[in-house]
Each structure stands twice: as structure tokens, then as C-alpha cells.
Amino acid sequence: MELLELFNIQGTLFLMILVGALVKKLGIVDEAGRRCLTDLCVNVIIPCNILKSCLIDLDSSVLRACEILVVVALAIQIISVILNKFLYKNYPEAQNKVLKYCTLVSNGGFLGNGVAEGVYGTLGLLYASMYLIPMRIVMWSAGTSYFVAGGTDKKKVVRNILTHPCLVAVYIGMAIMLLHIHLPTLLTSTITGIGNCNTAITMFIIGTILVDVPLLTIVNPTTLWISALRLVLLPAAAWGISRALGLEPVATGVAVIMTGMPAGSTAAIFAARYGSDAVFATKCVVLSTLLSMLTIPVWCYLIGA
């Protein structure tokens, strides 16, 4: 992909974020409206977008790439869990929980799918959906355990993993591909139409989140560190692992891009819900999101996207 085309994609995403920030600033969308949009996106739009990516003919090379992608994603999660064992011992407990979660969980579900689809098309979206599976499992297990004292209810964790709308969409989509099921045109058109809303709506939501944070307060050594870890060090590890496993170029690019996403916005949600440092979590999310507008194009250029 030409560098100019890549910057056009990033510029489009950035302008969508600005529109979201503007409508929130003008009061067109309030806090309740943002929550409704987020629920709509997570429960309907993203699952339809995932299903849309599965409406392709699956050949052996794509299936093999999906298998390796899941291995790479799992390796990154294991590395993150190991890093969390010793990196944040000297931080206050509330910040310790946030930093561990931000190391494990990216904003790949919101931002990553849109970027992967924009750069690599439908195949990129399929690979991105597969890459997110290990992260979502860890997010609902180890990730939430950082915030909930005494660990999590194992039955609830399993239920969350099995019934999360995005994962259900992956299960259904894989069945459609593996069994070569041909859906009626009416159904595929509906799924595609809803799924096509994903990029615009997710960027819009991120804009409504960013506008509430004073930008001058978000830059400090800790937020810069977690941003560097998420945006530079972890994607570099994903690149190395992908090359070592012989992953094909498009799938390698998706692995690097998805690993290099900013900290997950759910960090702030969990921090607020369980009495941790929600303000600090929001700063980590905001700074890494802003810096990702620079690092994602650089990674795309380096991997030859």
C-alpha cells in the first residue's frame, strides 16, 4: 500500500474521531447516548462486521493462516501476563491494576477491525477477528481478575467467553466458512449493510470519549511507558513471532497492526466499576489512542502494507 493511501486511511479515521468529539462537545450526543452507541456497536454492528468478513470462500492457505494467527495472539497474551508479574510492582495498587489490564487488553475490537479492513480489505477483517479470540478470552478471565478482589466467578467467566456477541459471531462465521454454507442474498445484504457501519461508528465513539479528557494532563512518564509498550514493543514481538512461524504477509501485517492497537477503553470502565483509578485509566487509553495515529502508519509502512 502506498504511504499516501495509508495516511488517507488514517486521516479518514481521525476525521471521524473529530466528528464524534464535536457532537459530544455540542451536546448532540450525551453520556447516555454514548453508552447506547457503545452497546449497539458491541452487540450488533461489530458482530455483523465479523460475519461479513466470513462470507468468503475459505481455502486451505487462509485456514492455515488463521491457525497460526491464533498461536501468535496467544503468545503475545502469555508474554503480557509474564510482564505483568514484575513490571508494575512499585506502582500504587489502583494504578497497578490499570497498567496490568492495559498491557493485556488492546482496543483492537473497536479500532483494530476498522484499520485491518481499511488496509487489507475483507481478508484483513477476517484475520483480525481470529486474532482477537485469545485476547477476549484473557480479557474476561485474567483481565477482569486484576480488578475484582479474590478473582472472578469461573462460571461467569466461561459464560462471558462463550456468549460474548463478537465471539458468537466468530463461531457462526467459522461454521459458515468451514461448512460452505451459502446464506440467502437478503440475509447477506443485511449483514453486510450493518457491518459496513463499523468503522464510522467506532471512530465516532472514540471521539466522544476523547473529548472529555483534558489533553494537557495525560502526558506523564507512566502513560508514555504503557503507550510505548502497547504501540511499539508488543507489536515488534508479534512481528518477530509471525516471521519465525512463517506466517504469510497479509496475516503478519494484521498480527502487527492488531497487537499495536492502543490500550483498551474497557480499562476505564472496569476501573470505575470496581473502585480503581478511573482517571488514570482514561489517561492511558487517551494517550495511547492519540499516539497510535502516528505509530500505526509507521508499522504499516515497515511491514510493507
Image (cartoon, rainbow, N blue to C red):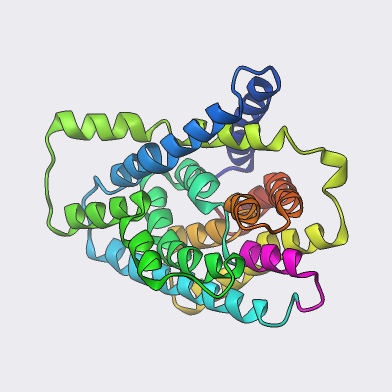
For residue 165, above or below residue 34: below
Q: Nearer the viewer, residue 171 or 294?
A: 171
Q: Nearer the viewer, residue 237 or 7?
A: 237
Instruction: Name the residue located 40 percent from the left edge and 62 percent from the top edge.
Output: 133
Counting from the top left corner in percent of width and height, residue 193 is at 32, 29
For residue 277, above or below residue 148: above
Instruction: Name the residue located 73 percent from the left edge and 64 percent from the top edge.
Output: 94
Magenta residues, dominant SS class? helix
**Residue 79 is drawn in which quadrant?**
bottom right
Instruction: Name the residue located 18 percent from the left edge and 57 percent from the top edge.
Output: 175
**Residue 61 is drawn in which quadrant?**
bottom left
Q: Where is the N terminus found, in terms of image quarters? A: top right
Counting from the top left corner in percent of width and height, residue 55 is at 24, 45
101 within the magenta span: yes
Q: Is residue 190 left or right of residue 183?
A: right
Instruction: Name the residue located 58 percent from the left edge and 67 percent from the top edge.
Output: 104
**Which residues make up the magenta segment?**
89-103
- How many numbered discs? 0
233 within the magenta span: no
Counting from the top left corner in percent of width and height, residue 122 is at 36, 45
Q: Is residue 198 left or right of residue 216?
A: left
**Residue 3 is drawn in which quadrant?**
top right
Q: Is residue 109 left or right of residue 284?
A: left
- Camera sees residue 11: no
- Camera sees residue 157: yes
Counting from the top left corner in percent of width and height, residue 123 is at 36, 50
Q: Nearer the viewer, residue 301 or 213?
A: 213
